[in-house]
Image (spheres, helix red, strand yellow):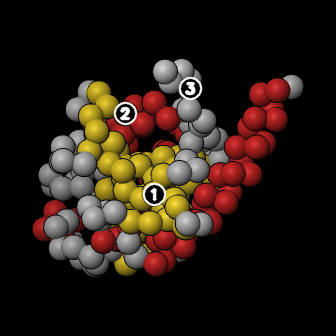
Amino acid sequence: MSTPREPLKAKLIVSLFMKEKEMLKPFALALQDIFGPVDMVSPWLAFDFTGYYEKEMGAPLFRRVLTFQKLVDQDRLVHIKYYTNELEAQYIEKGNRRVNADPGILSHERFVLATGKNFTHRIYLKKGIFADLTLIFTKERFQFLPWTYPDYRDQKMLCFLEKVRKKYIVDLKQDNESTKT
C-alpha cells in the first residue's frame, strides 16, 4: 500500500507572449505583487511555432519566461491559473488579449502547464483547470512527449528550463533548511 504524503514544493514558471514587448514590465510587476520576486528571466524568444494567436494578438509575437523566487505548493496551480487569467483580462483591448500568460510548475521530474482545455493526456484538477504534462526529466535532461507543444520542444526553451531546474534544486535545499530552523 502506498502512503499518501505531500509532494515537494515546485518552481513557479509563467510564460508570457505578446506582440508589444513593453507589455512585459506592467504584467511582470503585477505577477510579482502576488507571487513575489522574479529570479530568472529567459531571453526574448520568437513565438512563431503557430499562427493560432495571430488573429487575436497580431504578429510577430514574442515570448519571455519568468520564474519566481518563492517555491509554491503544487496544488496551488489551479489558483495560479485563475489569477493569470484575471490578469490577462485586465489587458484586453477591443476584445483581444495583449498578453497571454501560461503558468506552470517545475519539479525534479516534470514540467506541467495549467490549461482550461481538456484533452486525452490532460488530468483534471478542479474548477475547470487541467494539468498538461508538458515535459519529463529523464536521462539528465528534459524530454518532450508526443503532445508537447512545438515551442516547448525548442532547444532554446529546453536549455532555459534545464537552467531553471538547477536553480530549483538549490532553492529547494534552501527552503528545506529554512523550514527546519
Mark 2 or 1 closer to N-term?
A: 2
Mark 3 or 1 closer to N-term?
A: 3
Is residue 16 toward the left or the right of residue 38 in the image? left
For mark 3, what is the residue?
A: 6
Of residues 139 and 12, the one drawn nearer to the viewer in this rendering:
139
> Comparing marks 3 and 2, which lies closer to the viewer?
3
Image quadrant assignment for residue 149 = bottom left
User: Looking at the picture, which amino acid does disc 1 mark?
Assistant: Ile
Q: Residue at x 49, y 70 (%)?
A: 158
User: Looking at the picture, which amino acid does disc 2 mark?
Assistant: Val
Find out whether the residues at labels 3 and 1 contact each other: C-beta distance under 8 Å.
no
Instruction: State how far apart marks 3 and 2 are (Cα).
Output: 17 Å
Q: Secondary structure at mark 3?
A: loop
Q: Residue at x 40, y 31 (%)?
A: 79
> Comparing marks 2 and 1, which lies closer to the viewer?
1
Of residues 156 and 47, the one drawn nearer to the viewer in this rendering:
156
Q: Residue at x 65, y 47 (%)?
A: 69
* In this view, 167 is above or below 130: below
Instruction: State how far apart marks 3 and 1 are (Cα).
Output: 20 Å
Pinpoint residue 175: horizontal percent, then vertical percent: 74, 37
Q: What label sits on residue 136 in the rendered view?
A: 1
Q: Secondary structure at mark 1?
A: strand
Q: Residues within 10 Å of mark 2 (few under 14, many from 20)?
A: many
Q: Residue at x 41, y 49 (%)?
A: 112
Image quadrant assignment for residue 124 = top left
Q: What label sits on residue 169 in the rendered view?
A: none
Q: What label sits on residue 78 in the rendered view?
A: 2
